[in-house]
Amino acid sequence: MGSLYLVRHGQASFGAADYDQLSPRGAEQCRRLGAYWREHGQPFDAVFTGTLRRHAQSLDGIREGLGQALPALALPGLNEYDSEAVVRAIHPEPLAPPHDAEAVKQHFRLLRQGLLAWMRGDTAPQGMPAFADFSAGVADALQRVLAVGVGRQVLIVSSGGPISTAVAQVLAAPPETLVELNLRLRNSALTEFVFNPKRHHLVSFNTLPHLDSVEARALITHA
């Protein structure tokens, strides 16, 4: 069997004009993940990422902590959906920036509704592919992992949407489950598959072994 490690990017800039930028905390989360793997002698034979800035910055943090170059192939199919477009498709009126608890709660309530509408084909968020095409991009990435070969160790650095979609594909889960998986993923969290020549199998989901200490728990974030 081979092993695939899927990592959600570190904390980005939620609520800022440019979300696609790691915060200092997000960079530290990823450095600690790399350091954790260095301490445990984890090798990687292949690395795939999305093409977003936060994916590249997260991989840079992992490289720094791991102390390895880790050349990577960037795949657009591992990019995140546009959450603002998803929400606008069901709520076109302007929303207050999510800077307080109530605004954050409203954002995620609308996001859950918008994601389900997109997945069911009830909406077509502006500038986004149909969910079937989004899902096909994730499936392509998983096929590329199978092609790396049995016994290999593979890393994917991506976002919550593609990672939860990958898990849902492996489990044949419905859209409602996919959305709940998506909204539970923490920053820099680790999801593990094992794979044979034909398919992937889920081993673990949304773990943070690199932040499992009293001192490091303050670094745990969700958005």
Image: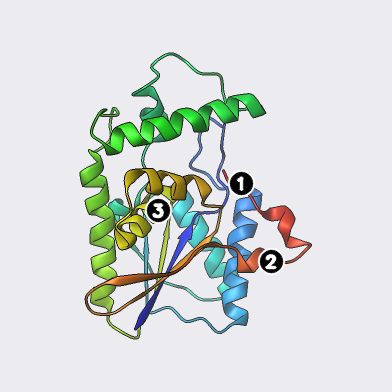
CA gap, disc 1 and disc 2: 20 Å
On residue 212, which mark appears? 2
Kind of residue sitting beneath label 3: Ser
Task: Please give the name of the residue rendered at 30% of the width and 84% of the height, measured from the top-left corner.
Answer: 150
Q: Which residue is mark 1?
A: 23
Tell me if 100 is positioned left or right of 165 in this view. right
Task: Please give the name of the residue rendered at 33% of the width and 44% of the height, measured from the top-left corner.
Answer: 175
Q: Are marks 1 and 3 in contact (CB under 8 Å)?
A: no
Q: Are marks 1 and 2 in contact (CB under 8 Å)?
A: no
Residue 124 lies in quadrant: top left
Q: Is residue 153 visible?
A: no
On residue 164, which mark appears? 3
Give residue 169's position: percent from left, percent from top: 30, 58
Under circle 3, the secondary element is helix
Under circle 2, the secondary element is loop
Taking 15 as reference, is 147 above or below it?
below
Q: Is residue 6 visible?
A: yes
Look at discs 1 and 3 and give the one toward the viewer.
3
Pointer 1 local density, CA inside 10 Å: few below 14, some 14–19, many at least 20: some
On residue 81, which mark appears? none
Q: Tell me how the rendering is colored.
A: rainbow
Tell me if 19 is positioned left or right of 92 in this view. right
